[in-house]
């Protein structure tokens, strides 16, 4: 990373609450310092906090996290100076340099006074808390009751502080990380406990964060789930009402529910579709100078405020709309009628053969013709797993399941049958 991004500014390193985080941090610090870079250790804080600090300090940054995965997994997210995720070209450069280092002896490495040093950055989390609170320019959440599910992850310290500072009455669950309980039956991937807590407490809403708090899922006052598509619909209409929806368009991915498109079209708002991944969402926001984009999973970017998805900031924005409109979250979410959606991952022997198979493509076209304007079908290769993702939206669950079964069978035929199990 040093050889590609340079060592003009200290690298910043943050992590979530996984037990392997400190081990990986130690290895990264050693490697960066050995290459001549200084390192600022941020401690445990959300991914969007790391991105914010990278932007404010014009420094490259690393976030040690596996997002919504279980504690056994871990990884590193890299931000260039300015807080933006790396382009494909920069990622390939770093991978090439890593292969060179792995396969050859290190020559000309810094020694003596040229070796980098590390230091703990004091007040990093406080800076992020202040940034989020100040982003609301005096707007308050007074009178609102919210339950926060911190997922035993990186939000456990700052999320309660931020929402309390904004004036909300806060109840917190799953905020006692032990290194292994991150995302375990909690957070944005399992809202069972939060839904019960909201109903039991009579709260106005609940917010569930994933392990590194770059995404959020909301819960309405009845315990209903409000996903990223619905939150984008709420925020898009609110921004348009305020005259702040630049370009009169919203960016989402090909996986967005058809209901989002219908909702926005009814308000004469364009939906710009991009491939799955918040990096592609940000690229489209920048290219078209738009204000709002995100994913169904709850990664939502307010480009005037951040370079990446921020679950805490998004949650605060949703509650701000609740307060400003004096409508309940369930009423606000009702502006978008979700189409029944079925998503299945199919493991086959030959992934690449599927999208090249003429019989499969003919079947997919036939399905699309049958659905016409009353649904859609999407088949794509996963970017993170060796599977084919089949997604169908239709007027009813039964119809969506029937069409999904039809497409799964076609995928299996085209891919040479199911992949062998280990």
Image: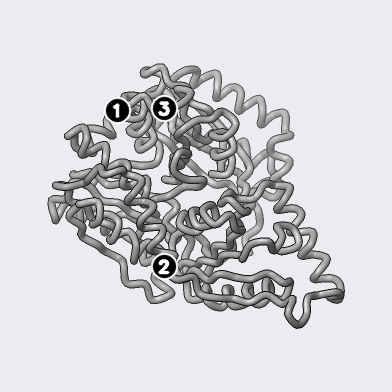
Q: Quadrant of the N terminus?
A: bottom right
**Side of 76 relative to 196 (left or right):** right
Q: Is residue 49 left or right of residue 354?
A: left
The mark tally for this picture is: 3
| Cβ atoms at labels 2 and 3 below 8 Å apart | no
Dot 2 crowding, Cα within 10 Å, few <14, some 14–19, many 20+: few
Examine the rendered structure and indicate whether residue 19 appears above or below residue 386. below
Choose the circle earlier in sequence order: 2 or 1: 2
| Residue at image point 44% right, 60% down | 46
Tag shown at residue 408: none
Q: At x 60% / y 31%, what residue is drawn? A: 287
Q: Using the rendered image of the protein, determine whether residue 185 is visible from the camera's viewpoint.
A: no
Q: Is residue 98 visible?
A: yes
The quarter of the image holding the C terminus is bottom right
Which of the 4 quarters of the picture holds residue 122? Answer: bottom left
Determine whether the residue tagged by mark 1 lies in a helix, strand or loop.
loop
Q: What is the x, y in percent for residue 145? A: 17, 51
Outermost residue on the bottom side: it is 112
Q: Which numbered disc, 2 or 3, marks the residue closer to the eye?
A: 2
The residue indicated by pointer 1 is 335
Q: CA distance from mark 2 to mark 1?
A: 41 Å
Upstream in sequence: badge 1 or badge 3: 3
- Return the mark for residue 245: 3
For the residues labelled 2 and 3, the Cα–Cα distance comes to 34 Å
Badge 3 element: loop
Whichever of callouts 2 and 3 sits on the residue coming sooner in the sequence is 2
Q: Where does label 2 land, which residue?
A: 123
Q: Secondary structure at mark 2?
A: loop
Q: Could you say which is closer to the camera, residue 9 or residue 332?
A: 9
Residue 44: x %, y % from top left: 44, 69
Q: What residue is drawn where x is 44% and y is 65%?
A: 124
């Amino acid at each position: 990373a040093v050889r590609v991004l340079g060592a003009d500014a200290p690298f910043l390193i943050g992590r979530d609450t996984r037990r392997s985080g400190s081990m990986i941090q130690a290895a990264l610090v050693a490697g960066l310092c050995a290459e001549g870079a200084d390192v600022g250790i941020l401690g445990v804080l959300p991914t969007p906090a790391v991105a914010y600090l990278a932007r404010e300090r014009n420094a490259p940054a690393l976030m040690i996290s596996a997002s919504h995965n279980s504690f056994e997994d871990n990884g590193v997210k890299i931000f260039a100076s300015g807080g933006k995720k790396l382009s494909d070209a920069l990622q390939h450069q770093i991978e090439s340099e890593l292969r060179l280092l792995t396969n050859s002896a290190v020559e000309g490495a810094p020694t003596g006074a040229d070796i980098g040093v590390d230091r703990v950055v004091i007040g990093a989390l406080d800076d992020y808390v202040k940034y989020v609170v100040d982003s609301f320019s005096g707007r308050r959440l007074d009178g609102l009751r919210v339950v926060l599910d911190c997922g035993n992850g990186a939000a456990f310290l700052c999320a309660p502080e931020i929402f309390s500072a904004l004036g909300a009455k806060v109840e917190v669950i799953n905020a006692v990380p032990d290194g292994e309980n991150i995302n375990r039956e909690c957070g944005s991937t399992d809202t069972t406990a939060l839904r019960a807590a909201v109903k039991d407490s009579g709260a106005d809403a609940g917010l569930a964060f994933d392990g590194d708090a770059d995404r959020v899922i909301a819960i309405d006052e009845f315990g209903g789930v409000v996903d990223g598509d619905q939150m984008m619909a709420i925020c898009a209409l609110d921004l348009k009402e305020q005259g702040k929806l630049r370009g009169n368009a919203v960016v989402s991915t090909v996986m967005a529910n058809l209901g989002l498109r219908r909702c926005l079209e009814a308000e004469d708002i364009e939906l710009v579709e991009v491939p799955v991944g918040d990096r592609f969402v940000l690229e489209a926001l920048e290219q078209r100078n738009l204000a709002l984009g995100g994913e169904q999973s709850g990664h939502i970017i307010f480009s005037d405020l951040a370079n990446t998805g921020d679950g805490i900031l998004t949650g605060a924005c949703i509650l701000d709309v609740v307060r400003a409109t004096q409508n309940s979250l369930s009423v606000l979410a009702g502006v978008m009628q979700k189409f029944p959606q079925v998503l299945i991952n199919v493991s086959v022997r030959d992934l690449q053969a599927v999208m090249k198979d003429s019989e499969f493509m003919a079947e997919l076209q036939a399905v699309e013709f049958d659905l016409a304007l009353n649904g859609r079908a999407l088949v794509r290769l996963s970017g993170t797993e060796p599977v084919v993702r089949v997604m169908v939206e239709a007027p009813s669950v039964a119809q969506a399941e029937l069409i999904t079964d039809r497409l799964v069978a076609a995928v299996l035929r085209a891919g040479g049958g199911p992949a062998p199990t280990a």
